[in-house]
């Protein structure tokens, strides 16, 4: 899709809250947004009605981030991305080896956005 962000590559981790909403808007403006899903996470016949709204203009890949292979693939994708957006609980991405320090070591220009509904301290 053409748009002002057509050269921007975005990697999206997080299926609820502000992260998928922001990814949808970036996709609306032409960004290449790739959503990271858990294997078996999305079933079209049981997805909630808002699924299509939040996931428009996105591609997706299923990765098991608890496996070494899944984390390695996520790191490879992040090395080629311009933006990583995540909405995980505090500390989750660091424990997976996918926190900002780890990913920006391989891609110093990477913009790492943390978006949770309740900040990094919880509700």
Image: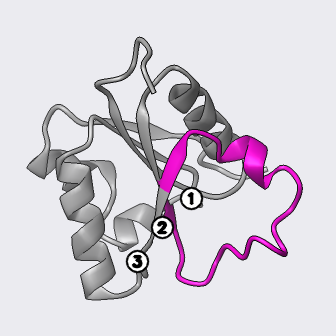
- Whole-Å distance between the Cαs marked 2 and 1? 6 Å
Q: Nearer the viewer, mark 1 or mark 3?
A: 3
- Whole-Å distance between the Cαs marked 3 and 2? 11 Å
Q: Which residue matches tag 1?
A: 88
**Residue 114: x, y in percent?**
50, 42
Farthest residue toward the top?
4
Is there CB contact under 8 Å for labels 1 and 3?
Answer: no
**Residue 104: x, y in percent?**
19, 45
Q: Is residue 90 above or below residue 40?
A: above
Q: Residue 61 versus residue 101: which sits nearer the camera? A: 61
Over which residues does the magenta segment extend? 35-59
At x 39%, y 19%, the residue is: 5
Q: Mark 1 Cα within 10 Å, few/some/many (few <14, many 20+)?
A: some
At x 32%, y 28%, the residue is: 8
**Residue 30: x, y in percent?**
46, 24
What label sits on residue 65 in the rendered view?
3
Is there CB contact under 8 Å for labels 2 and 1?
Answer: yes
Q: Is residue 45 left or right of residue 57?
A: right
Q: Residue 42 versus residue 19: which sits nearer the camera? A: 42
What label sits on residue 92 in the rendered view?
2
């Amino acid at each position: 899709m053409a748009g002002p962000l057509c050269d921007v590559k975005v990697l999206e981790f997080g299926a609820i809250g502000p992260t998928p909403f922001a990814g949808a808007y970036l996709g609306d403006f032409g960004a290449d947004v790739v959503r990271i899903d858990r294997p078996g996470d999305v079933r079209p016949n049981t997805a909630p009605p808002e699924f299509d709204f939040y996931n428009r203009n996105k591609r997706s890949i299923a990765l098991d981030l608890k496996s070494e292979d899944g984390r390695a693939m996520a790191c490879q994708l992040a090395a080629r991305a311009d933006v990583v957006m995540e909405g995980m609980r505090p500390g989750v991405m660091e424990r997976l080896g996918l926190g900002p320090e780890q990913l920006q070591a391989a891609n110093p220009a990477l913009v790492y956005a943390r978006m949770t509904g309740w900040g990094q301290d919880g509700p």
